Image (cartoon, grey):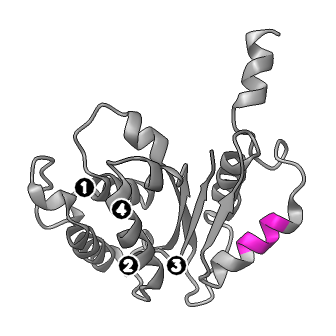
Amino acid sequence: MHSDSIDRLTKPVYGKKKFLGNTLLINSLSTGISQGRSFTLLGGPGTGKTSLLLHLKEQLSGDINSVRSNREKQCIYLDLAIFLTEKNRQTLPFFIFNLIKSELNTPIGVINQPLKKTSSKTGDWSWLFDELKSLIEAIRHSDRWKRYALLIDNADLLLLSSKLKSALAPLTKMIDQQDDYMPVSIIFAGGR
């Protein structure tokens, strides 16, 4: 087999012209996100979980309106495998905050205090919740404000990685929060 044939078998496939089938599942997940429901997608390697999440991100970001608001939603894709393989010293709360801030295209000067990677507070989940609240308050009345769904790929690593085991409870707490600075929905996808 040629390397390009292998790439086609192992790389995620998404986009309107590439991702075919699963219309019922995509519609169910899309409706669920707009209704504020969260989901877990389980399946073995190569079953299309990553492709499905990336397709949802592309399809839903900017295309649907929130039931709670007339503003657009943003789907934010977080791959825990990438977080673990990067040679950085960021904590998961700091990584999630920077990802959300970047995806919402937030201007750098929006946060009152500059963030420091070395701060011990950046590993604290209450720090993340406070920073998300400050971030959303700063952009709430601008065109950058959107409700967002968090699409977490390789979520099985929350159970398998010693670095991530403590993150499961705070992430599930985010699901229960009704505040507009928290994700409107979370989709966990994984399975090995």
Q: Which mark is residue 21?
A: none
Query: How far from the left and from the top, in percent, is residue 6?
Result: 76, 19
- Any part of residue 101 in sight: no
Regarding mark 2 in the picture, which secondary structure is present there? loop
Q: How far separated are the C-alphas under marks 4 and 1?
A: 26 Å
**Secondary structure of the residue carrying numbered label 1:** helix
Report the magenta stretch's main SS. helix
Residue visible at 81% across and 50% down in the picture = 16
- Label 4: element kind: helix
x and y percentages locating residue 69 in the rendered image: 55, 88
Rendering coords of residue 17 (x, y %): 85, 44
Residue 14 part of the magenta segment: no
| Of callouts 4 and 1, the N-terminal one | 1
Q: Mark 1 points at which residue?
A: 108
Q: What label does residue 181 carry, if any?
A: 2
Q: Residue 167 carries which label?
A: 4
**The N terminus appears in which quarter of the rendering?**
top right
Q: Quadrant of the rendered structure where residue 173 is? A: bottom left
Q: Are marks 2 and 1 in contact (CB under 8 Å)?
A: no
Task: Tell us which disc is closer to us: 4 or 3.
Answer: 4
Point out the tag, 4 or 2, that comes first from the N-terminus.
Answer: 4
Q: From mark 4 to mark 2, how far is it between C-alphas?
A: 18 Å
User: What range is drawn magenta here?
Assistant: 25-30
Q: Do the residues labelled 4 and 1 touch (CB within 8 Å)?
A: no
Residue of label 3:
184
